[in-house]
Image: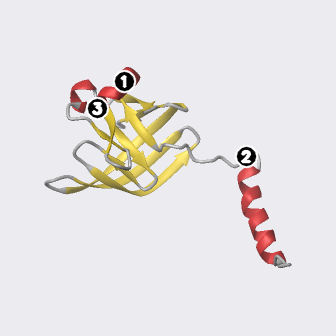
Amino acid sequence: MRQLHIPYVLAATLVLSAFALPGNALAFDLTGAWATSADQCSKVFARKGRTRQVTFTNFSGVYGGGFIAEPNRLRGKFENCSIKSRKDDGENINIVVSCASGIMLSNVQFFLKVVDDDSVTRLFPGIEGMEVTYHRCKI
């Protein structure tokens, strides 16, 4: 019978208990497809290919558009952005991404406010009253 080494068991226990301690805020799960109107999800996103990957429909912009969040990137209809940094501060998420479109590279900063598990609002600091709410699509 194989024996477990105490240091490995102790390390695994400490890692798992760090997530269970009260007061430790876990990052908001942004992964998924997000549209500006929950009613339009099927017109903005579709699953395609053998892997059934979520992608944008041909006329997604007509229905408000949206974005697809993955663990290390954000995708728009015409942009592919790598997440450079992310900071969660309670209900606020600050993300800095490096984006590549067909023409140029750029860095963009997103300020998101968590409304609930399936809604976030993008804020535009410095532009009073400018905000866009996105809803998680169940596709």
CA separation in Å, label 2 and label 3 = 36 Å
Q: Pointer 2 and pointer 1: residues touching (CB < 8 Å)?
A: no
Q: Amino acid at mark 3?
A: Gly
Q: Residue at x 75, y 66 (%)?
A: 12
Q: How many marks?
A: 3
Where residue 121 appears, x then y in whole percent? Answer: 43, 31
CA separation in Å, label 2 and label 1 = 33 Å
Q: Indicate which disc residue 65 carries.
A: 3
CA separation in Å, label 3 and label 1 = 8 Å
Q: Residue at x 44, y 57 (%)?
A: 85
Image quarter where the N terminus lies is bottom right
Q: Indicate which disc residue 73 carries.
A: none
Where residue 64 appears, x then y in whole percent? Answer: 28, 27
The residue lying toward the viewer, choosing from 66 and 88, is: 66
Q: Residue at x 34, y 27 (%)?
A: 42
The residue lying toward the viewer, choosing from 126 and 7, is: 7
Disc 1 packing (10 Å; few <14; some 14–19; many ≥20): some
Where residue 57 appears, x then y in whole percent? Answer: 25, 35
Q: Residue at x 25, y 42 (%)?
A: 77
Q: How is the image coloured?
A: secondary structure
Q: Is residue 36 visible?
A: no
Q: Amino acid at mark 1?
A: Ser
Where residue 139 appears, x then y in whole percent? Answer: 42, 33
Residue picked out by circle 2:
23
- Secondary structure beneath dot 2 equals loop
Task: Give above or below for 11 relative to 128.
Answer: below
Name the mark nearer the viewer: 2 or 1: 1
Q: Amino acid at mark 2?
A: Gly
Q: Is residue 113 visible?
A: yes
Residue picked out by circle 1:
37
